[in-house]
Amino acid sequence: MKTLIIQSYRTRDVARWIATCLESVRAWSAVRGCDYEFVDDALFDLAPAWVRDRCGTQILPVTDIARLYLMRERLRLGWQRVVWIDADVLVFAPERFVLDDGMPYALCREVWLSRHGDRVETGEFVNNAVIVMTPSQPILDFWLFAADEILRTHPPGPIGKLIVGTHLLTDLARAMPLRVISNVGLFSPPVILDIARGGGPSVQAWAQRQGHVVDAANLCASLQDREAGGACIAAADLEQAVAALLRSKGAIVNDCLMASQDRPQLAAAE
């Protein structure tokens, strides 16, 4: 299948761990025989001007919309499959990481873990860290339409960073089944800290809820140096976590799995 992998990030002041993530995807793309395209901040120009104006300094919704326009454009150029992968996704087991050729589209299943003292909570969502699209998928045009309507009717004031990404997709998953991939995990700050330290209860709890071997992970760059999920991660923590994941090829997480049976492919957000 003629596949194009797309990533985007700025080209200045790039953290070392982000550069490692980008290189891991480029290398994986080459191994899988996929073409690869990197887009710099010119990506933002693909979002309509009114979207950029409405979102102001909140760039994540602009990115969410711009990537959809880019994917649609590439599909119209004749690609059989276009895959968006966020810049903070690390492929730590490239020999295992495979995207199902039979999926006409796919989003990402997300298990979010937060800590409140000694108490751990997990919830399931759907995110767009990895997006798989093939031609003539109505979900792509619908997603753009829904995002436009959400932003047009949003009350005056700040725009939430997940409003046309995770929040929209998770709400949609409550109304209908969505095709998701489960071999890309989302590691919240408490999980990243445990990985950086060589393991711990947050990793164990996350893996049990995930219930599926992961070969790549979204490391949540937007949460660096911010408290989220009951923890705060710095660049040094992320660098250590990246090193641990690459060194173990994900075993530091996958060895915590308590069950071998995969979760269903259709996500139901909680």
Image (cartoon, helix red, strand yellow):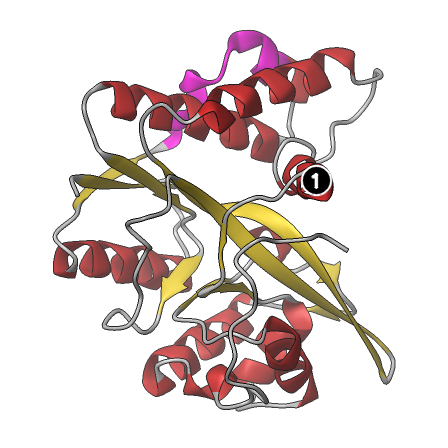
**Figure quadrant of the C terminus:** bottom right
Q: Say left or right for 270 vs 6.
A: right
Instruction: Please provide percent x and percent y for residue 264.
Output: 56, 63
Question: Residue 208 falls in which quadrant of the image?
Answer: bottom right
x 72%, y 37%: residue: 175
Q: Residue at x 45, y 45 (%)?
A: 106
Is 50 magenta? The answer is yes
Q: Give neighbour class at mark 1: few <14, some 14-19, many 20+ (Cα, 10 Å).
A: some
Q: Is residue 81 above or below residue 125?
A: above
**Along the horizontal axis of the image, is 229 left or right of 95?**
right
Q: Main secondary structure of the magenta part?
A: helix
Residue beneath the point at 57% across and 76% down: 211
Snapshot quadrant of residue 247? bottom left
Residue type, label 1: His
Residue 253 at x, y = what percent?
Answer: 51, 83
User: Which is nearer the eye, 190 or 209?
Assistant: 209
Which is nearer the eye, 233 or 168?
Answer: 168
* Nearest the eye: 221 or 13: 221
Report if residue 27 lies within the magenta region. Answer: no
Image spot of residue 54 (x, y percent): 67, 15
Image height check: is 256 above or below 269?
below
Q: Which residues are magenta?
A: 41-53
Residue pointed to by mark 1: 167
Residue in the image at 23% along x and 72% along y: 95
- Quadrant placement of the N terminus: top left
Residue 230's place in the image compared with 161, above or below, is below
